Image (spheres, rainbow, N blue to C red):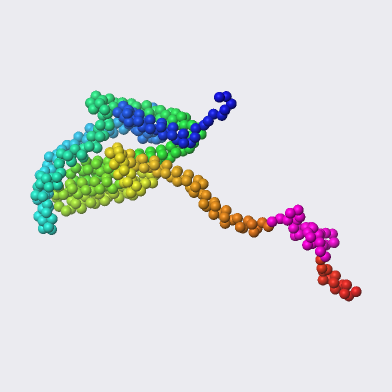
Amino acid sequence: MRGQPISTPSSFQRWLAVLAVGLVVVWLLHVLREALAPLLTALAIAYLFAPLVDRLEAKGLGRATAVSLVLGSSILGVFLFAVLILPGVIREVANFLSHMPKALESLHARLVPWLESHSINLPHSVDELFASSSLDPAALAASAARPLQFLFGILIGGTRSALGFLANLLLIPILAAYFLYDFRAIVEGVEALIPPKHRSQVVEIAREIDEVLGHFIRGQLLVMASMSLLYAIAYGLIGLRLAVPIALLAGLLTFIPYVGSGTALLLGLLMALIDWQGWIRLLWVVLAYSFCQLLEGFVIVPRIVGNKVGLSSTWVLVAILIGGEAFGFIGILLAVPSAAVIKIFVLRALQAYRSSWLFAAPEAQALSASTEPQHQIATPEPCTGMDPPSQSPPSSSGQPEATHPISARAAPPPPEATTASGNE
């Protein structure tokens, strides 16, 4: 109908619409997760390398040259790792597994007399240990390999074929190159879709999330690589078996507080016990581990990560436990970044609560109650229609004018006038 104002949606309706759109987006991502896996992987790579490309572009390189240099170096590093390091790691692990039964029997023969002398009874063989504890070695190996199978399934996709895997490997770098080249335009396009009324606030929140999340992810990847290199060098110098596999595993688990360092120490001590060469080997393992921890705590983490995330180790562990229980292995990977993002929204919600009437109302009431009596005492009630006597100007004879009924009475004469009349 013409002439009637157009009704605007209420706040509840707007939030309901936003929630509905978010649920639809999540549902689409779940349905198309297999097809979107290479796309999202390429987008994540572009997000990680975008600051480095911008820095190279600011130094005078062209955008295409910077993208080619960054992606080419990354692909070359992955290729060299897969060709030079990974086969040696696989060979070393296979060799150790083939000799592990004899090594365990030898360790068992050395430990049993000492333990029995201290009234500690152990099974007499490895098979008896598994039988007494109702453990299935095949089930243990399958459960230990389940995270790797999950990651391998994400990389391969739904086809589970070598052709699909190779296609994804070729597609991801190409998509990452396009995303890196147009990353600034993509961000500006997304920003232009935000309503102008809320654009400044949304952009401010997005920048806070990008600062915390991007700094944490990039820094954590550098810390993981640094700790893997440190453990490999330290354990390799003391001649520990499986030094490189232990270093890689401990470095990958560094993002979980205490788990990566604990893995490095326990596996190092276990290798020293299995490959027994005296108590001095255990001492060298502890010294090498302590040296790596000192470098991590006082040099690597403060310089690379700092305190940008602002989450204590307890909250990180709680977030990892909740993420792992709710979403499995992928929840463990996304727990700490999600906790950092949630922290930003929680701090903003607390700030809004402290500035709201709900938080400031009791304080305002107490302030007004304490100041109200003081205003009543300091401000006297004015006389209606007349000025107070103290504000009346003096007359020409020196006496104040009678502007009040009390001032109309005869004032007593001054002392000088009284004495003068008495003398006369």
Q: Quadrant of the rendered structure where residue 34 is?
A: top left
Residue 28 x %, y %? 35, 29
Q: Which residue lies most toward the front here? A: 1
Residue for point 61% across, 58% down: 374
Displayed quadrant of residue 330: top left
Where residue 179 appears, as percent x and y from the top left, is 38, 28
Residue found 33% across the figure and 49% down from its top: 314
**Is residue 371 among what the camera can see?**
yes
Residue 32 as seen in the image, left or right of residue 277: right
- Closer to us: 362 or 156: 362
Q: Residue at x 30, y 38 (%)?
A: 327
Residue 91 placement, left or right of 183: left
Please tell me which residue is depicted at 69% across the width and 56% down the height of the picture. 381
Does residue 396 show up magenta in the picture? yes
Which quadrant is the N terminus positioned in? top right
Q: Quadrant of the C terminus?
A: bottom right
**Position of 127 compared to 27: left or right?**
left
Rendering coords of residue 411 (x, y %): 81, 66
Q: Position of residue 231 (x, y in %)?
A: 25, 45
Q: Is residue 304 above or below residue 163?
A: below
Q: Is residue 54 visible?
A: no
Report the predominant secondary structure element of the magenta stretch.
loop
Residue at the bottom extreme, as displayed:
423
The count of marks equals 0
Name the outermost residue toward the right. Answer: 424
Q: Point out the stretch of residues depicted in magenta.
A: 381-410
- Assess whether residue 385 is covered by the magenta stretch: yes
Which of the 4 quarters of the picture holds residue 387?
A: bottom right
Q: Is residue 197 or residue 294 the one in the foreground?
A: 197
